[in-house]
Image (tube, rainbow, N blue to C red):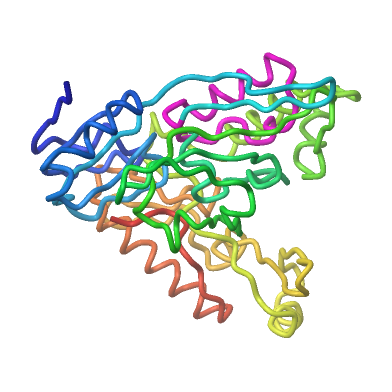
Amino acid sequence: MLDFKENISLKPYNTFGIEAFCSFFIEINSIEDFMLLLKTDIFHSNSKLIIGGGSNILFTKNFNGLVIKNNIKGISVVSENSETVIVKANAGENWHEFVMWCINKGYCGLENLSLIPGCVGASPMQNIGAYGVEIKNLFYELEAINMNNGKVDVFNNAACEFGYRESVFKTKHKGVFFITSVSFILTKTQNLNTSYGAINSELAAMKISTPTIKNVSDAVISIRNSKLPNPREVGNAGSFFKNPEVPKEKHEELKLMFENLVSYSLPSGNYKLAAGWLIEQCDLKGYEKNGAAIHTKQALVLINKNNCSGLDVFELSNYVIQKVFDKFGVSLEREVNII
């Protein structure tokens, strides 16, 4: 039996803690639930928004339609050999809890992605990444239901067309598929990635010279806790902006003007700039307007400091984008899904 709720507040369902209402709301706990939902008039006669942990979304207005919360749980081992294991997690699983499950089993690969908020189903949508690792490095396949015809499709790595915080689920297949599970291929050996400088520094501070996957996870958690606000304490959606990519010529021009420019060379010959550094140089850390603010420890993070509206946060992001463009001639792009 499906349990539709009408005109409910979405404040508990987004990590910004923004007040917004939707016409209809339903939690989906199984594939069977979703198949039943596909047969309802409410599904077919309304705009639809699928949410998981609500950690990458900003409501600037009420949602005049059906909000579907993916709450399908379960973790299992699909196959394994002496070196690798394929682990399948259903889309409604909490991402960090899933990472901890893998670490406790001794499965290596996801430890650098510890403490990222949200659910498993959202992880491939925007190819989440942190500290030198992206989902595309570990992704095996996902299962999803086509909402137009009820057919179950399987997407392998190539089919997802992963890019920087991108996939087909944010572009040509946006709003088409309901992801039910995601599978990852992990290793049983300690194949650690500590290339991101802060991890090595944190491990050194912890006096660990031969780290385990648990040690790397602990280091990442410590770094994130030192820089990023806890959504339970202050509303936020993590990094609000993508790191912009510029051609070599633009990079050289900026380097002449700003010798401390933080950038990374890419295989394409272009350069990725650190958006947080660009924002900092505009003296915007801690800047506040109408209750929306830029976090004092990490300029990439916009926060709901004092019961602001989603529109307040959006207007603050516009202000940041304009300031960075005025100073550097570089356009920042939002990472957060704006509703």
Q: Quadrant of residue 40?
A: top left
The answer to which of 199 and 290 lies nearer the viewer is 199
The answer to which of 262 and 75 lies nearer the viewer is 75
Q: Is residue 149 magenta?
A: no
Is residue 177 placed above or below 111 in the rendered structure? below
Quadrant (top left/top right/bottom left/bottom right) for the N terminus = top left
Query: For the point 55% across and 48% down, which residue is it?
Result: 298
**Residue 140: x, y in percent?**
65, 39
Q: Quadrant of residue 70?
A: top left
Is residue 76 placed above or below 146 in the rendered structure? above
The answer to whether residue 225 is left or right of residue 338 is right
Query: For the point 76% across and 32% down, which residue is it?
Result: 202
**Residue 264: x, y in percent?**
75, 63
Is residue 260 placed above or below 36 in the rendered structure? below
The answer to which of 97 and 330 lies nearer the viewer is 97
Q: Is residue 114 magenta?
A: yes
**Residue 2: x, y in percent?**
17, 25
Quadrant (top left/top right/bottom left/bottom right) for the C terminus = bottom left
The residue segment tinted magenta is 91-119
Query: For the point 61% across and 20% down, which residue is it?
Result: 100
Query: For the point 66% across and 46% down, which residue is it?
Result: 134
The answer to which of 120 and 38 lies nearer the viewer is 38
The furthest residue to the right: 209
